[in-house]
Amino acid sequence: MILAHTIAMSDLIFDDIGSFPLPEGVTKEWMESAFSKRDNDEKLFSVIGSAFSQKLDAGVQVATYPQFQDMNQQFLSIINDPECVEEPFKVKEDKARILELDILEEAAAEYRDKTGEKPDVRVCVTGPLELYLKEFGGTQYTDILNLLAVSIDRFISNSIKSAKNFNIRTVSIDEPSIGINPQIMFTDAELVEALTTATSYAGKQNMDVEIHLHSPLHYKIPCDTPNINVIGVESAANPSYLDLIDKKVLEDTDSFLRVGVARTDIFNLASVLNEKYNTNVWKDTQYLSEIVTEMETPDVITKRLEKAYSIFGERIKYVGPDCGLGSWPTQEIAGQLLTNVARGIENFCK
């Protein structure tokens, strides 16, 4: 496919969703204990700083802080702590802190010393609806939803105000249940109100605000949310998702897309290799590298981006992997996928 004009690399922004494999010898259980007990900060900080540096080295332009915690518990553990709230579900402003961002300061300072520039960072926070569903399921307490939204806004506000050695370029609200979970009892208007509250501070800053959806079925909800200007679509594994989005709706609401151009559904990818070699690649690991050398290659990624761009053009602002890489087998393979995305974008922009 020949594009009508050359795309400048700066016109498309390469970001990632957040999660990343743990290094060899470090378990999820150890990380959970390290986060809760804070009894081995040196190693904890090293794991997080190293993962962040690997993302930058792979070419991610706006890297998300490495997410090694459960996306709900990361915030609910603070929101549900009586010492951290001024009323139920409304976190105190000084307690609304994302530990990982504090940890990143050292790694970001090293990057700044080496390059002379602060790295750009994407802050991902779990959305108010997702936290509500975790706590209350299929009920409809709008006041609690809005209190959770205020708390999320405070986490975002603190993150932006506290950053020293990095620039927070993008804020992302993670709401995977919208369009998928049948338990949602709130109206679209109530969801728009909560999302508007949760992104209030970010909306006043000179930065993009994304929403990460696992299905774009109800993409018009974030389009109608004043502070959200980028809608994430997991379109690498599900190309038909792009068919659900009307470019005119994006134009009318001045909204943009974050398009997934690399598959991250590792278990489905591995099953292809299992069938190909009649083995279990999680035990017979010699074939796993084919995921990034034969399947999710820069050429494949470029073709996906060409297809998406032929439909939406300059309404695409961000590109990257579909979702997080926390389930991937090793940091090396995950890092190679990110490198492949960078090369795929570069090929497209030429």
Image (tube, rainbow, N blue to C red):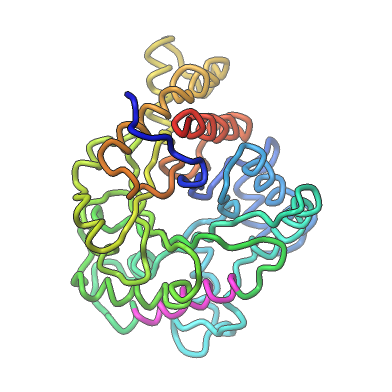
282 versus 117 height, above or below:
above
Q: Position of residue 194 (x, y in %)?
A: 33, 75
Residue at left 66%, top 73%?
162
Residue at left 60%, top 79%?
95
Query: In the image, is residue 106 part of the stretch drawn in magenta?
Result: no
Q: Which residue occupies the foreground of this view, 349 or 28?
A: 349
Q: Is residue 84 visible?
A: yes
**In this rendering, would 37 be left or right of 157?**
right
Q: Position of residue 149 (x, y in %)?
A: 40, 76
Q: Position of residue 103 (x, y in %)?
A: 71, 60
**Quadrant including the N terminus:** top left
Query: Which span is picked out in magenta?
Result: 146-160
Q: Position of residue 99 (x, y in %)?
A: 64, 65
Query: In the image, is residue 153 part of the stretch drawn in magenta?
Result: yes
Q: Is residue 135 visible?
A: no
96 versus 62 height, above or below:
below
Q: Which residue occupies the foreground of this view, 269 or 1?
A: 1
